[in-house]
Image (cartoon, rainbow, N blue to C red):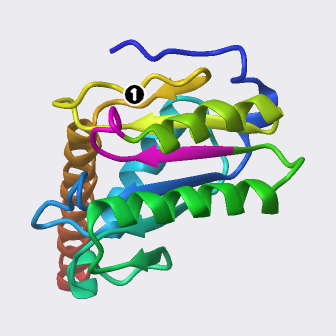
Amino acid sequence: MSIKRTSRQDSRFIRAKTIAFWDINACQMPVGLDARDISASVNQTLMNMNYYGKLCLRLYGDTDVDKIGHTDDTLRFCGMPRTTILEQILVDLYGVSLFNRGTPFNMLLIVGDLSKDKAILDAFSLLPKRGWVNVLVCQPSAVEAAVFSSEVQLPPWEKIVETAFAICEKKEKERVDYRKEIRRNTSQS
């Protein structure tokens, strides 16, 4: 897997906060996972790419809140058509950019096909030119990768989901092993 690295990926962004804008309609939550699992997977992927700052997920989509799972992440909007979701992401992109003006941060867009969404493409091309925004992108492998003037492409969405399942399996194995150890210790007493 090759990851495009840009000159913008410098020490200013290594420990900077990453704000993720996740279209949960285009990059759906698989059955058996919730937002905490995906958050852990995205966080691990970012750390593997040398981004160590705090991750904040903003979820956008048309889904039942109960299906997402209880998290501290922000579910922005439910019950909207895709174009409205992308418009709201765009508004929030600019809001976050203004709020964090001058403070380096990473902006991650987790979305589907953007080839027809010129406003999002333009925003993600212009924001890095300000000098304090680093753009990261994650999309399903089936869509044409969006090309921005300065961006780092994360592994495809399917790899993020695969990693989330692996993290869940590892946690479950650790819980089972821990329970066995407790039983062993109590039976020896």
Q: Is 121 included in the stretch rendered in magenta?
A: no
Residue wearing tag 1: 146
Residue 55 appears anywhere in the view: no
Report the magenta residues as a range. 106-116
> Residue at position x 52%, y 45% from top?
108
> Residue at position x 53%, y 29% from top?
49
Q: Is 73 left or right of 167, judged from the image as shown?
A: right
Image quadrant of residue 156?
A: top left
What is the count of numbered marks? 1
Does residue 118 sit above or below 167 in this rendering? above
If the image is split into quadrants, where does the C terminus sit? bottom left
Image quadrant of residue 147?
A: top left
- Residue 53 position within the rendered picture, expressed as x and y whole percent measured from the top left: 67, 49
In the image shown, does 48 or 145 lie closer to the viewer? 145
If the image is split into quadrants, where does the N terminus sit? top left
> Residue at position x 49%, y 66% from top?
88
Does residue 132 sit above or below 60 in this rendering? above
Does residue 150 sit above or below 85 in this rendering? above
Q: Is 111 included in the stretch rendered in magenta?
A: yes
Q: Residue furthest left?
A: 31
The kind of secondary structure element at disc 1 is loop
In the image shown, does 66 or 164 lie closer to the viewer? 66
